[in-house]
Image: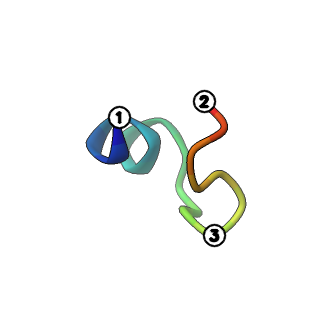
Amino acid sequence: MTTRTFRCGPQPSRTPLET
């Protein structure tokens, strides 16, 4: 979950666990 968010979004702060 976390790895996918970081990869999809350049800014993890914007999308913590939304995607």
Please report whichever mark, 1 or 3, sits nearer to the chain's N-terminal start. Answer: 1
Amino acid at the residue labelled 3: Ser
Please report whichever mark, 2 or 3, sits nearer to the chain's N-terminal start. Answer: 3
State the residue position of label 2.
19
Secondary structure at numbered mark 3: loop
State the residue position of label 1.
4
Q: Residue at x 35, y 34 (%)?
A: 4
Q: Residue at x 57, y 45 (%)?
A: 17
Please report whichever mark, 2 or 1, sits nearer to the chain's N-terminal start. Answer: 1
Question: Could you tell me how far apart the alpha carbons at marks 2 and 3 are, in whole angstroms?
Answer: 12 Å
Instruction: Give coordinates of residue 8: x percent, y percent.
Output: 47, 35
* Residue 11, quarter of the rendered image: bottom right
**How dense is the environment of label 3, judged by Cα within 10 Å: few (below 14), some, or many (20 and up)?**
few
State the colouring used for the structure image.
rainbow
Question: In front here: 18 or 4?
Answer: 18
Instruction: Give coordinates of residue 5: x percent, y percent.
Output: 45, 42
Q: Residue at x 72, y 60 (%)?
A: 14
Secondary structure at numbered mark 2: loop
Instruction: Give coordinates of residue 15: x percent, y percent.
Output: 65, 51
Question: Could you tell me how far apart the alpha carbons at marks 2 and 1 are, in whole angstroms?
Answer: 8 Å
Amino acid at the residue labelled 1: Arg
15 vs 8: above or below: below
Image marks 2 and 1: residues in contact by CB distance under 8 Å? yes
**How dense is the environment of label 2, judged by Cα within 10 Å: few (below 14), some, or many (20 and up)?**
few
Question: Could you tell me how far apart the alpha carbons at marks 1 and 3 are, in whole angstroms?
Answer: 13 Å
The answer to whether residue 9 is left or right of residue 3 is right
The answer to whether residue 17 is left or right of residue 8 is right
Image marks 2 and 3: residues in contact by CB distance under 8 Å? no
Amino acid at the residue labelled 2: Thr
**How dense is the environment of label 1, judged by Cα within 10 Å: few (below 14), some, or many (20 and up)?**
few
Secondary structure at numbered mark 1: helix
State the residue position of label 3.
13
